[in-house]
């Protein structure tokens, strides 16, 4: 994506961190928003860095003065944090998204052209009722099992509908056409694994936590069973997916929300690879039944053929490349681990 004006919310978060750098590297002008103060490194890459709550009208006003072409609305409370405070999660995740859809609508109308809203949805929108059924299901397609058991999953699924409504049906009773100023597009992310940041507040966190602990030579007790399975992806592919979907011609898109996949290891496979990448890593399993139940309701893998067909989605990193070319060397450098086994 080049030379556009991009607004990123949640810019200090895991995805924001990498996305901001990728967008700056291709000449985009960036307005970033985060609840926490931006780092000097991030501030230097942005036209303006706004520190504040996405629900605060002053924050919205500060962003609205720009001729925004695309919004990456990343700010959200993840699944664990949302279960600890469901009402706050609803405010941040749903009302926050509404604010930015409205902002996109106003900016689009003012400029007479649509504003793209790129949305990170999640595999948490799925809810498979039992583990037996999960074991019997194939890779899930976008419209299957739309019955999330978490507040976060319910918020994200509703946001997908809100985005579609703003894009295609907004104020459908009005005399003049009001839809078409928002061009909402989203990917359902699997668990993301970054070499540079450790997530917090999610349920897929067991994989990145295990890897980052091993790199520091610290023991890790994994909160899910060894056979627990959900899809994962290396962060560079997550960022690539958002940018590629933003760049895709609208007429090629047959849906507004797409599954994207890369690899789907069990927790024990992740532990084995972690031990190969960081010899001596001490990993044990002590499943927490509540967090395990959430993981069991998420799919073992997803069918991403629609994304592949419509906008050529393909991950660059499979499981081995993720561990030995991306994670091991970068994490080792970060923690000065001289035993790491990169390639
Ligand atoms: C979480 O665990 O809440 C997230 C997700 C899978 O969307 N990482």
Image (cartoon, rainbow, N blue to C red):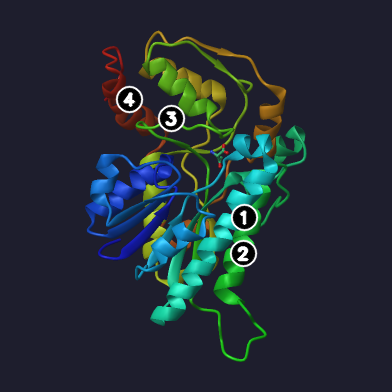
Residue labelled with disc 2? 162
Residue tagged 3: 198
Where residue 335 sits: x, y (%)?
31, 19
Cα separation between marks 2 and 3: 30 Å
Locate residue 40: give its quadrant. Answer: top left
Say if mark 1 contacts mark 3, CB within 8 Å: no
Query: Who's the residue at 29% across and 44% down the image?
Result: 42
Mark before the other along the chain sequence, 4 or 1: 1
Q: Label 4 vs label 3: CA separation?
A: 11 Å
Disc 2: CA contacts within 10 A as few (<14), some (14-19) or many (>=20): some
Q: Which residue is mark 1?
A: 94
**Quarter of the image holding residue 218?**
top left
Quick one: quadrant of the N terminus? bottom left
Q: Earlier in the sequence, mark 2 or mark 3?
A: 2
Q: Which comes before the other along the chain, label 4 or label 3?
A: 3
Category of crowding for the residue at label 4, using alpha-carbon neighbours closer than 10 angstroms: few (below 14), some (14–19), many (at least 20): many
Q: Does dot 4 land on a helix, a strand or a loop?
A: helix
Residue 202, how many percent across, how many down?
A: 56, 35
Q: Say left or right for 72 vs 168.
A: left
Residue 157 shows in the view: yes
Quadrant of image for the C terminus? top left
State the residue at coordinates (47%, 63%): 117
């Amino acid at each position: 994506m080049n030379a556009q004006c991009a607004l990123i919310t949640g810019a200090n978060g895991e995805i924001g961190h990498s996305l901001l750098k990728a967008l700056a590297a291709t000449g985009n002008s960036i307005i970033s928003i985060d609840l926490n103060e931006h780092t000097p490194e991030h501030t230097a890459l942005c036209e303006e860095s706004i520190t504040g709550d996405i629900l605060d009208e002053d924050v919205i006003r500060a962003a609205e003065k720009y001729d925004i072409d695309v919004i990456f609305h990343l700010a959200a409370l993840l699944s664990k944090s949302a279960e600890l405070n469901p009402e706050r999660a609803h405010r941040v995740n749903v009302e926050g998204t509404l604010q930015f859809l409205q902002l996109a609508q106003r900016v689009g109308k003012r400029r007479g052209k649509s504003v793209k809203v790129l949305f990170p949805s999640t595999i948490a929108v799925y809810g498979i009722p039992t583990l037996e059924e999960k074991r019997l299901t194939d890779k899930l397609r976008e419209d299957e099992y739309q019955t999330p058991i978490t507040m976060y999953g319910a918020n994200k699924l509703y946001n997908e509908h809100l985005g579609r409504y703003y894009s295609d049906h907004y104020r459908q009773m009005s005399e003049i056409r009001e839809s078409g100023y928002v061009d909402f597009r989203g990917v359902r992310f699997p668990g993301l694994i970054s070499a540079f940041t450790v997530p917090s507040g999610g349920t897929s966190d067991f994989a990145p936590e295990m890897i980052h602990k091993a790199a520091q030579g610290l023991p890790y007790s994994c909160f899910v069973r060894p056979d627990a399975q959900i899809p994962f992806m290396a962060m560079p592919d997550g960022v690539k997916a958002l940018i590629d979907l933003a760049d895709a011609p609208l007429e090629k898109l047959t849906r507004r929300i797409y599954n994207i996949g890369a690899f789907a290891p069990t927790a024990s496979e992740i532990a084995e690879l972690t031990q190969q990448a960081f010899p001596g890593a001490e990993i044990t399993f002590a499943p927490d039944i509540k967090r395990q139940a959430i993981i069991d309701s998420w799919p073992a893998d997803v069918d991403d053929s629609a994304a592949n067909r419509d906008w050529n989605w393909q991950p660059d990193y499979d499981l081995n490349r993720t561990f030995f070319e991306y994670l091991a060397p970068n994490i080792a450098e970060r923690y000065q681990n001289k035993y790491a086994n990169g390639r």
